[in-house]
Image: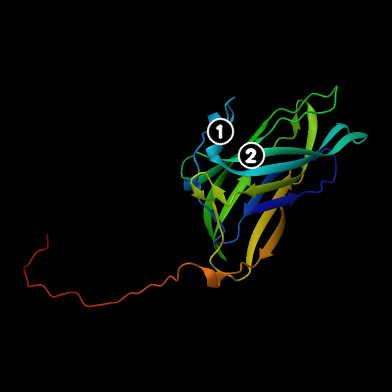
Amino acid sequence: MTIYQHATLSSADDDVRDTFVRLAPGLLGNPQNAAVCTSATLRSDAGCPAAAKVGTVQVTATIHLLPPLVSLPDQVIDGTVYNLKPTGVEPARLGLKLEPRVLPAPLPGLPAVYLESPVYLRPGADGIGLESVFADQPREQSGLNVQITSVRLTFLGKASKGSFMRMPTSCGPLTSVGRVNSYQMPAFSEKTSVFTPTGCDSLGFSPSAEGALARPAPRARGACRR
């Protein structure tokens, strides 16, 4: 499953700050089916183990050298998404590692970038959906103005211990929501994406529920329950 967000910024001085995503109800991930990595390990020389990988990320950015005169547009930076140990009451947490980027000499290379995002299950008017936000994204690296223009986040269908992403079991139209703001414009710009799952008639189960009400059995006066 891929989430794609693109931002058109009004000037070279502004940058994406926070990106928010609310997935359609029933579109869920299972963090129990991947190994868990800590925040410290993510940033260590060894890095997170492959068993903690749950996806990939690709960032496209413009590097402004002498804005607005000299810029390097469409610089692609690849990375990996890991299953991190949750903090506090979080049910799950994601960790992103963007790989170092080599730039033409004599420019300095861009070091690895790390981002984390808590993941929550929150009720809404359309049901319960997964929500996450990557907050306070970096504006520069190695003294260079790095302006993020798009992010492509792809989650695996299967992780190291089994299925990771799961499709909804309802086949009506479902809506996901994406929001982006910038450092100069704190108000969020919002877009929605609608898709309709198919194949609900092929589900391997047919859930049902039954219940009944009955009067409690009479007890003799003075009797006690243990």
Label 1, secondary structure: give it: loop
| Most foreground residue, 9 or 49 | 49
Residue at the outermost top position: 106
Q: Residue at x 81, y 28 (%)?
A: 103
Badge 2: residue crowd in 10 Å (few <14, some 14–19, many ≥20): many
On the question of residue 13 being in view, the answer is yes
Residue that mark 1 sits on: 48
| Vertical side of 120 occupied by 59: above or below | above
| Vertical side of 8 occupied by 37: above or below | above
Quick one: label 1 or label 2, which is nearer the N terminus?
Answer: 1
Q: Residue at x 91, y 36 (%)?
A: 68
| Vertical side of 47 occupied by 225: above or below | below
Dots 1 and 2: beta carbons under 8 Å?
A: yes
Q: Position of residue 77 (x, y in %)?
A: 74, 37
Looking at numbered disc 2 in the image, what kind of residue is underneath it?
Thr
Q: Position of residue 95 (x, y in %)?
A: 59, 39
Inter-mark Cα distance, 1 to 2: 10 Å
Badge 1: residue crowd in 10 Å (few <14, some 14–19, many ≥20): many
| Most foreground residue, 193 or 79 | 79
Looking at numbered disc 1 in the image, what kind of residue is underneath it?
Cys
Q: Position of residue 110 (x, y in %)?
A: 75, 28
Q: Quadrant of residue 206?
A: bottom left
85 sits to left or right of 222: right
49 sits to left or right of 107: left
Residue that mark 2 sits on: 80
Q: Quadrant of the N terminus?
A: bottom right
Q: Quadrant of residue 175?
A: bottom right
